[in-house]
Amino acid sequence: MALAASLSLFLGLGFTAALADDVLTPEAIAAFEQRLEGARIAQAGVAERVACFEAQDAAMVAQRDADQLRLGTLVAHKKALEGELVQRRDEYDGFLREYNEAHGLVSQLAADLDDLRRYKAAKDEALRRCKQSWALFGFMCDFSMEIAKLIGQIHDNDDQIARAEQRMTNAVAGMQKANERYDQSQTLLNEAVSDAVLTTDQINLAEASISRLKAALAILRPEAQQNVELLGQFSGALRDAGRVDTADGRARTARLVRTLAGKIDGVQEKASSLQERAGKLLTPQQLSACFK
C-alpha cells in the first residue's frame, strides 16, 4: 500500500512537471507573438506581390483584348481597302480602254481626213486645169457640188476628231484621278498592314507577359493562402494559450503553439524562396513594377 501510494505520488509529480514544462509563460507567449508578427510581415510582402502581379495580369488581359478588337477592325479595314484597290484598278483600266479607243478613232479619222484633203486638192487642181483648158467654156468644168460635199465631209471629220480628242483628254484626266485614288488607297492599305503587324506583335507580347504572370501566380497564390491559414491557426492558438484554465488544456495549447511555431518560422524563409522562384519567370520590368 505504501509502495503504491509512493508510486502514484511519483507519477503525479512527474505528470505535473511535464505539464509545467508544456505550459506557456506570459514571456513565452510574448516571444511567440513577436515571431507571429515577423511572419505576418513576410506574408504581407507575399500578398502584396500577389496583388501586384494580379493587377498586372488584369491590365495585360485588358490590353490584349483591346488589341484583339483593334486587330479585327484593322483586318476588316484591310480587306475593304484591298477591295478598293481592285475597284481603282478597274476604274483606271476603264479610262485606259476609253483612251485607247478614242486614240484609235482619232488616228483613223486623221487618216481619213488626209485622204479627203488630198482628194479635194486633186479636184481643185482638176477644176483649175479644166477651166484653163476650156477657157470661155469653163462653165462646163463645174465640180462645185462634189467639192462642196468634200468640204462638208472634211468639216464633219474635223468635228469627229475634235470630239474624239476630247474623249482622249477626258480619259487622261480620268486615269490621273483614278491613279491618285489608287495611290491613296495603297497608302492606306500599307498603313493598315503595318498597324496590323504592330498590333499582332503587341498581342503576342501581351500573351507572353500573361503566361509569365500566371506561372508566377501559380507559385505564389497557394503559398499565400496556406500562410493565411497557418497564421490564423497560430494566432488562435496563442489566444487560447492565455485563456485556458485547466492544466491539461494549457499543456495541449502549448504543444500546439510550439508545433505551429516551427511552421511559422519557415514562412519568412519560404517567402523569400518563393518570390525568387517566381521572379525568375518574370521580366525585369514586371519585377520592378512590384518590387519597389
Image: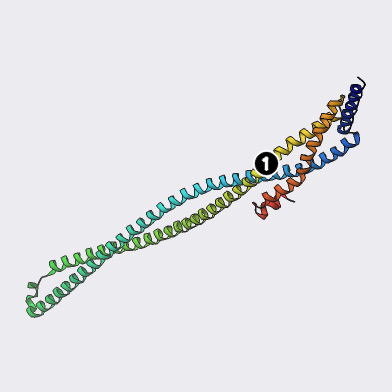
Residue on which disc 1 sits: 221
List x then y, in percent, for residue 156.
22, 63
Q: Residue at x 11, y 70 (%)?
A: 143
Give whichever of 30, 59 is nearer the camera: 30
Q: Is residue 8 left or right of residue 124?
A: right
Quadrant of the image occupied by residue 96: bottom left
Q: Residue at x 7, y 77 (%)?
A: 136
Give whichever of 151, 135 is nearer the camera: 151
List x then y, in percent, for residue 248.
84, 26
List x then y, in percent, for residue 289.
70, 50
Q: How many marks?
A: 1
- Mark 1: secondary structure: helix
Q: Residue at x 91, y 22 (%)?
A: 5
Amino acid residing under circle 1: Arg
- The quarter of the picture where the N terminus appears is top right
Dot 1, how many residues are within 10 Å of its Cα: few (below 14), some (14-19), or many (20+)? some
Give whichever of 115, 63 is nearer the camera: 63
Q: Is residue 95 above or below residue 76?
A: below
Q: Is residue 7 left or right of residue 173?
A: right
